[in-house]
Image (cartoon, grey):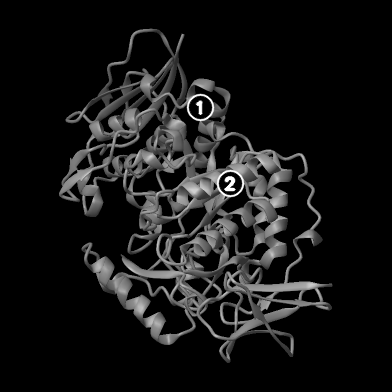
Amino acid sequence: MIKTFRVWAPLPEKVEVRVGADLFPMGKDANEWWTVVLPSVKPGSDYGFILDGEGPLPDPRSPWQPHGIDGSSRLVDHHDFVWTDANWKAPPLSSAVIYEFHVGTFTPKGTFEAVIEKLDHLVELGVTHVELMPVNEFSGSRGWGYDGVDLFAPHHAYGGPEGLKRLVNACHARGVAVLLDVVYNHLGPAGNYLGKYAPYFTRRYSSPWGQALNFDDVGCGEVRRFFCDNALMWLRDYHFDGLRLDAVHAIFDASAIPFLEQLASEVKQLEAYLNRPLVLIPESDLNDPRLLWSPEHGGFGLNAQWSDDFHHSLHSVLTGERNGYYADFGTLADVGKALRNAYVYAGDYSPFRRRPHGRPPVGLDGNHFLGYLQNHDQVGNRAEGDRSNRLMSVGRLKIGAALVLTSPFIPMLFQGEEWGAATPFLFFTDHQDPKLGQAVREGRRREFAAFGWDPERIPDPQARETFERCKLDWSEPSQPSHADLLDWHRRLIALRQSEAVLRDGRMDRIQTRYDESERWLVVERGPFVVACNLNAAPKTVPLPAGKPQVLMSSVPMESPDRLPPDSVVIMKRE
């Protein structure tokens, strides 16, 4: 086949491409793109670029790195895969139940193909959307994926491009939409060759990971094009239904039209072209509604945002933890405010930050926010990867699940949460450079020591055993100690899916009452009432007027207003 090799590379004086054993010179145009057209290149050929005699280096837009971050790139023809989802359209976010998972630990095999074998479990649970943690190429064979470098290449250890397409196709065949977590705020420390090609980085800003990516400095137009094209590729060529944008508060950009606004605009154009809904869901700790407001109202036009304030308020109340950023939370009043307003801090003074934080989310409803009790960060960034079931009773797990799944937010579960998985989710890496591996190991210990955790108890992130411990045990869901919690989640999801009021996102219709000393909370959503007792003793909880019908209770109850310790009841008034 005829193949045009192109690469943007204003920094080197000479660029060549090696295809197999053959070397070809490339010519540069006025926009500093190097190009060569080759008449006979076989599909699946390996190639790499040589910059001023150095290389071959991977293509910045490599579609496949079968030998890892330092190996040759491989050509992929996206037209070769036969899709069977021609009529597929994702369900709206307002009706979504999202399930986040990590491909490498979701199954014993840790591959895209192996995930397909567990999709029926998710369908039976009531999941409508799955969210994959990053799957682009990263260092070694195991890792979270947030230190990726070859952003266009599905990870070789998971099954590469073919395996990923099979997974997305299989999800769509079962009526499940697929979201992908992407990282546009930094690149990993290993295999990062972009700086040799072009000004992908800038010294204008300081990043927690080193040099910041260049979204508003000299040459930023092509850098922004690189990341927009990456997003469009996942949505177009791999048929993803949306992207989760990692830590957008770490994208530094003072442009008149910020990168995120440009990205949202281009995704909307692709949505119209493909005639199926596409969504962008940022993670941000700024409590800034401008991410979600439309450009006409001074915003960026993204679709929904992770809601950490809801998580933090709920987690701190259920566990009693007050360290780190949990110092800003811990009361039932915080839970109530989060349910009514999404942000607990909307311009309020934050003791943890020692400054005012956030802005009121005017004009936004609950369907602009994701609500959760667990996610990869909140579990994996604990020293020992403790899930919620290690930190609270089964009764409180059920309370947490009830408040998440009856909330005005888009609910999200983390892999294994539905049955109270006993396996931890730890931070793990597989850097091949021993010095880098040791630096990660030491940095992790220092980080956790600052939070008061014993550094000696922190598992070695480089050890294979650390990774293996995180793999879900699929024998657990059928065990009596886990089956009850799994049934609780299934019934909660079924209730949410059957009642439009629970999906309408109307935070303005939510009423909350609580007693901090007695430790009870009552949430009203239209005709629905969720009453919780977090006390160690039975408590009489004042219910609203009207004869309630008990729909679900976490334990047997003599009366819906007399709640046993650590229990919750869900009612519907006539």
The kind of secondary structure element at disc 1 is: helix
What is the x, y in percent for residue 203?
34, 70
The amino acid on which the numbered mark 1 sits, given as a three-letter code, is: Arg
Q: Nearer the viewer, mark 2 or mark 1?
A: 2
Residue at 40 percent across and 44 percent down: it is: 373
| Labels 2 and 1: the sequence-earlier one | 2
Whole-percent x, y for residue 215 in the image: 43, 60
Splitting the image into 4 quarters, where does residue 513 fall?
Answer: top left
Assign the N terminus to one quadrant of the image. Answer: bottom right
Q: Mark 1 highlights which residue?
A: 503
Q: Residue drawn at (26%, 28%), measured in percent from left and top?
A: 520
Q: CA distance from mark 2 to mark 1?
A: 25 Å
- The image's mark for residue 267 is 2
Residue 365, placed above or below residue 213: above
Residue 319 in picture, x, y percent from top left: 28, 45
Q: Is residue 556 left or right of residue 320?
A: right
Q: Looking at the image, which residue is at 54% across and 52% down?
A: 476
